[in-house]
Amino acid sequence: MKRHLLLVVSLAALVLFFAVQLYMIRSVWQQKEEILLMRYRNLSREGLSVLLSRKKANGFEKAMEVTDKLAEFLVKEELSKLSDASDTLALNRMYLKKINAVLYKNEMLTSFLASYIENAGYHKDFKSFIAISNLELFTPEGRLQVTDTVWSAPPKNLVFVNTFREEHNNFLIEYHYLIDLTHKNRLVLREALLSFVLIISSTLIVFLVFWLTWSNLMEERRLSGLKSDFINNMTHELKTPLSTITVAGKTLKKEQILADPEKVLETADMIGKQSVHLNQMINTILEVSLLERTEFHLDRHPLAADELIHEIVSSFLTSCDWCAVIEEDYRTEGAVIHADTVHFTTMISNLLTNAVKYCDGDPVIKVMTTVECGNLEITISDNGIGIAREHLNHIFEKFYRVPHGNIHKTKGLGLGLYYVRRIAMAHGGDVSASSKPGRGTTFRIRLPLKTNI
């Protein structure tokens, strides 16, 4: 319950943290955007003031001259042709369109401001935007209103610079000059990039720390469970032979047993087998403890691989009263390995023992050796119950046992395969496993070769 509560609280905190980071990114973006617009507005107005003070001009002089000539032509040549209100409206639209084109084509303010802003150390990546709010033509009959609009606030990507009102021989015009930051988002991103990198990096670090912490917590929980299972299994494994020995010892004290030599020998044999089993378990625990020490060293000697493995197989069959059928196939042609006889023997014996232990029927084991790329490859295959894929990556871990519901069908401490891998690695090699449930398991040990005999 506490673990689930911790997970819920942690996830809630992460979601809140992520929401705060998004809010910060949005705030930074808005702040940088406002600063950018303010900067270009101030620089543009400064540039316009400089132009007005130096040249007593605003950059639209040529545009006004062309507009005045166009207005004169319109008044003298076109107005007399108008017959009704629709003609007047069409003429107004055409004239307004032409005036706009003239202003954009002939104004010099934009190029001056671009140069001024660039000299100030900022990008000149913008265009001009001109909005005519009032335009009147001077005709012999009086003023002709071409357009009269109410100016509203510009969109965010437009920066207002100034409003101009000019009166010439043939027209009067009021227009607003703005600069259009067409790539505003790119400019804002460029300025806010460092802040975004820091925010995103801190977010990723927090998520990484959370993931590592949670993974370590789950790993510690898993290891704690494995250790608890090991202690329970070890207690059970030790109690079973000890109880058998205790009962057998009490049995030997009975007069009717002492009077029957066969019963005495049977009981003594039982004590001997249980003593051997108990001694094997103790030795396994001691050997694994020895492997954990940094000063652990192998007593290695050059050994003929095929002969050594054949001796191990023969000894195993003898010790287990020919409990399995073992098919031997050696293809190493006298290859030599540099190995510790005791640990190497125990490593192979552990795999053979597992092949017998985890078989529901009559065990059939195939032991094969080959030489691959300068390595001795020992393959031990069985016809046992197999191992599910989700457990294959864990079978070499200390204390790990493949679960079978709430019980383990076979006895063990979860140290055998861990010992196999540690010994294989100590010899400079490794071990792997492949399996299909119900069809058996194959273990492959790869060890470097020394020389040939």
Image (cartoon, rainbow, N blue to C red):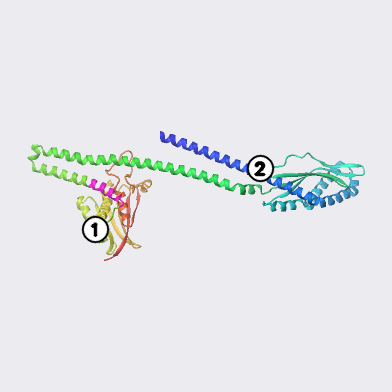
Question: Residue 381 placed where, x, y %?
Answer: 30, 53
Q: Residue at x 28, y 44 (%)?
A: 413
Q: Which sits earlier in the primary sequence, circle 1 or circle 2?
A: 2
**Residue closest to the eye, 414 or 406:** 414
Looking at the rendered structure, which numbered label has been put on residue 340? Answer: none
Range drawn in magenta = 280-294
Q: Position of residue 9 (x, y in %)?
A: 47, 35
Q: Amino acid at mark 1?
A: His
Residue 247 in the figure: left or right of residue 363: left
Q: Does the stretch in magenta take in 288? A: yes
Query: Which residue does the numbered mark 1 point to in the structure image?
Result: 310
Asked if labels 2 and 1 touch by Cβ distance under 8 angstroms, the answer is: no
Question: Taking the image as drawn, is residue 361 in sight?
Answer: no
Is residue 239 at least partly visible in the picture?
Answer: yes
Disc 1 to disc 2, C-alpha distance: 83 Å
| Image mark count | 2
**Magenta span main SS:** helix
Q: Nearer the viewer, mark 1 or mark 2?
A: 2
